[in-house]
Image: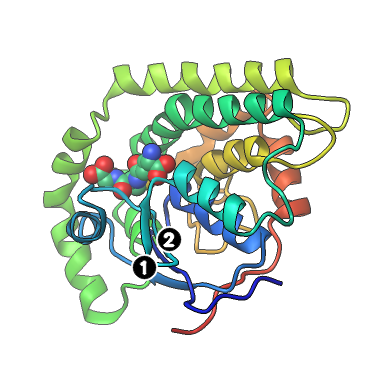
Amino acid sequence: MATEATVPVLWHLKVSHYNEKARWALDYKAVPHVRRAAVPGQHRSIAAKLTGGRTFPVLELNGEVIGDSTRIIRALEHRYPEPPLYPADPDERRRALELEDYFDEELGPASRLLFLYHALPDTDLMLGAFAPDLTGVRRLMARVTFPRLRPRVAAGFGVDEESAALAFDRLREAGDRLRAELQPSGYLVGDGFTVADLTLAALLAPLVAPEQFPYPQPQRGHPRLAPVREALEAAGLTEWACEMYARHRGRSAEVDA
Ligand SMILES: N[C@@H](CCC(=O)N[C@@H](CS)C(=O)NCC(=O)O)C(=O)O
């Protein structure tokens, strides 16, 4: 188990799949760490103060402040090499990193868009997924105000029928890529679980909603997501992603602040 003079701090969004990449890497490597969750939207100003950027996750590690899930995993791999997420073989390592980049760029935005396209019309589904800690009066207030926020979220993420159709295409392509790259081992690169598998499974998590995802996913089995579940099945992604979660999304290494 890793030990650390200063406990790493992960600034994250519970709902988010890029944030899930960083959480999964920390948990996989059993790195004790503190998590600080923000409400989506409010996280941008925190990110700006921490990194000058606008996105979460952000990891504070040994006095360094790292924004971007890919850079976070790279830093963790360097600081906590065991168990590895990067293959030892240089060619395999290059392929794993290429796949991480491909899924980050092509699938990540598409799966977020598909989630929003289907969930946005349902206030309770949106609040349950994006603000799971909101209860009582604050939750009631959010239910009242969310309908006014809805068009701004849709516009901000470019959610419409055309973008949803393109995102379905990206999902199919991710399935094609999985089939093309899948090794006899059942993993994307070489004989074992790597950053490529972690990335694809984490970026599918908002749509697949695997049991082991560490936070509430009210979309699991929700009728509004039925078209997405059909597309995932048709693309051959559901079973593989659930298998990666079942095998490798183990115990949380989060510690109290
Ligand atoms: N490439 C970044 C993407 C992170 C990302 O897009 N995070 C979203 C949450 S899922 C975010 O913070 N978005 C805020 C914004 O774009 O303003 C990574 O891998 O960390």
* Pointer 1 residue: 37
Beta carbon of the mark 2 residue lies under 8 A of ligand 1: no
Label 1 neighbour load within 10 Å: few <14, some 14-19, many 20+: some
Which secondary structure, mark 1? Answer: strand
**Residue 49, can we see it?**
yes
Give whichever of discs 1 and 2 has the lower sequence position. Answer: 2
**Relative horizontal placement of residue 111, taking residue 236 as reference (left or right):** left
**Which residue is farthest bottom?**
256
Quarter of the figure with the N terminus: bottom right
Which image quadrant for residue 61? bottom left
Residue located at (50% from left, 57% from top): 217
Percent coordinates x, y for residue 150 in the rendering: 19, 45
The amino acid pointed to by label 2 is Lys
Residue at image location 81% in from the left, 30% down from the top: 190
Please state if 154 lies on the left or on the right of 162 as rendered. Answer: left
Q: Nearer the viewer, residue 89 or 226?
A: 89
Q: Which mark is residue 88?
A: none
Q: Residue furthest right?
A: 184
Query: Are there few (<14), some (14-19), or many (20+) residues within 10 Å of tag 2?
Result: many
Question: Vertical placement of 54 versus 89: above or below?
Answer: below
Q: Quadrant of the C terminus?
A: bottom left
Q: Nearer the viewer, residue 11 or 245?
A: 11
User: Hey, which quadrant is residue 26 in on the image?
Assistant: bottom right
Percent position of residue 216, x then y: 50, 63
Distance in Å between CA atoms under marks 1 and 2: 7 Å
* Tag of residue 14: 2
Give the percent coordinates (x, y) of residue 48.
Answer: 19, 54
Q: Residue 241, located in which quarter of the rendered image?
A: top right
Tell me if the residue at label 1 has its CB under 8 Å from ligand 1: no
Which is more toward the observer, 108 or 33? 33
Residue 107 percent across, percent down from the top left: 48, 28
